[in-house]
Image (cartoon, rainbow, N blue to C red):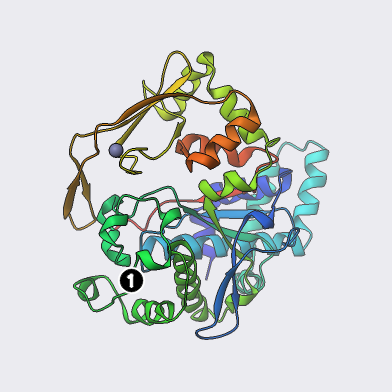
Amino acid sequence: MFDQQIQENIFSLSKFVYYLCIHTGHFNSEFLYKVKDSGPGNLEVITPFKGEGVNSYSIMMGGEIANSFTTLYEGEYFLKALFLSGLASVLIRNGFIAKYKELLAKEVDNLDDIIQNDLRGLDSDLILDNMKTPLVAIVSSLDNDIVPIRYNKHKYWGVDESKELVRCSEIGPSDYQINIDTELENYLLTKMDKDILIEISGYDDISLEKAKIIQLYRSFQKLTEKLGINIKNIPLYFSLSPINTFSKLDSSNSFFEVLRALYTLDNRNLQRKLSRRHEPWIISWKCSKCGNSSKSVLYSKLLGDGKTKIKCRSKKVDFVNESGESITKSGCGHEVNIQIPKDKEGIRNFLIEKKATCNFTVKFLSNVLKDYYINPICLVAGDIGI
Ligand SMILES: [Zn+2]
């Protein structure tokens, strides 16, 4: 069943296995979220206990809070991550990883060939069995610093007009409504999507972020059922980043040191290269005058004196969805130049107080920091191509 997939992806899979062998990172469950499943109509989003998880491994995948249904690419990310977790579990349970670590210590020069040969010889049924009780956590990383209007998706969750330009992290239970009886029903929602949304509408007092977590959990459950897999046995977690992460990290965390270092003028060139912008930005926050939080409307820039300029642009911006419909918005023209604190504690407090976000290059690079909340083995990426 998986022979062809292994052969076609042999190079990337052997690299994945290599990273399983050299991984020295962490998996800090207490910074994440998961679903407590007590049956139909009885799901709850909770924070896991500290130290949860079988080992320090994790696989990261994307997800979009603004989608009220599971898109094909979200489903694909999950199934890819589950396959990788199952594959890794075969190798851990059957002593392959221990063997590779020994070979690494002996500095053999053909480890890659050995891994590839072993992978080609794996039994598909064994992989599927291990996908039923995988050992490697899957973390769906949900960006909560985007606004629902991005890609013109605010309609999907019935977000109140006054909240279209507010970040997903700030959308509470009364700011959105689930209504499947709309034009969306005709071309976006399957019966499964509708059933899930009806269930979610029965939960009291859940934020948009938590509604999305429940929505993803239920649809992944339906997908895994088709493979004879019980989702309750999958170590599936969710992260709400970057905004929730800032407040959960201690001020001694090296993430704040990275931000502090990027604010030096020497490192502005580094940030230029990372973000491929001549006028790079590192930290951004909502307009203090009109509350606009869209990164398409706000213009952020690191100035030569180390200050950050935030301008709420009055220029009209189009937000376009997948079917080409667009909506136009603009900011109020307000502009500020602010000095970011130079010490780690000050930066942390500033980020929390302003409900600030950081450039995606910084956010993704932070996942290699040893004391960050998780250090994933890989990020499952790429869409289904349609
Ligand atoms: Zn404004």
State the image quarter where residue 96 is shown: bottom right
Instruction: Answer above or below: position of 83 versus 367.
Output: below
Q: Is residue 217 visible?
A: yes
Closer to the camera, 168 or 371? 168
- Write the residue at 35% across / 62% down: 67
Farthest residue toward the front?
A: 289
Q: Residue 80 appears at what percent x and percent y?
A: 51, 61
Instruction: Answer above or below: position of 308 versus 77.
Output: above
- Write the residue at 36% across / 76% down: 193
State the image quarter where residue 200 is shown: bottom left
In the displayed structure, does residue 363 sit left or right of residue 303?
right
Closer to the camera, 131 or 176? 176
* Mark 1 lies on residue: 177
In the displayed structure, does residue 253 sit left or right of residue 212?
right
Q: Is residue 4 visible?
A: no
Closer to the camera, 348 or 100? 348
Q: Residue 123 appears at what percent x and percent y?
A: 63, 69
Closer to the camera, 170 or 50? 170
**Amino acid at dot 1:** Gln
Instruction: Answer above or below: position of 191 versus 46.
Output: below
Q: Residue 150 appears at what percent x and percent y?
A: 30, 50
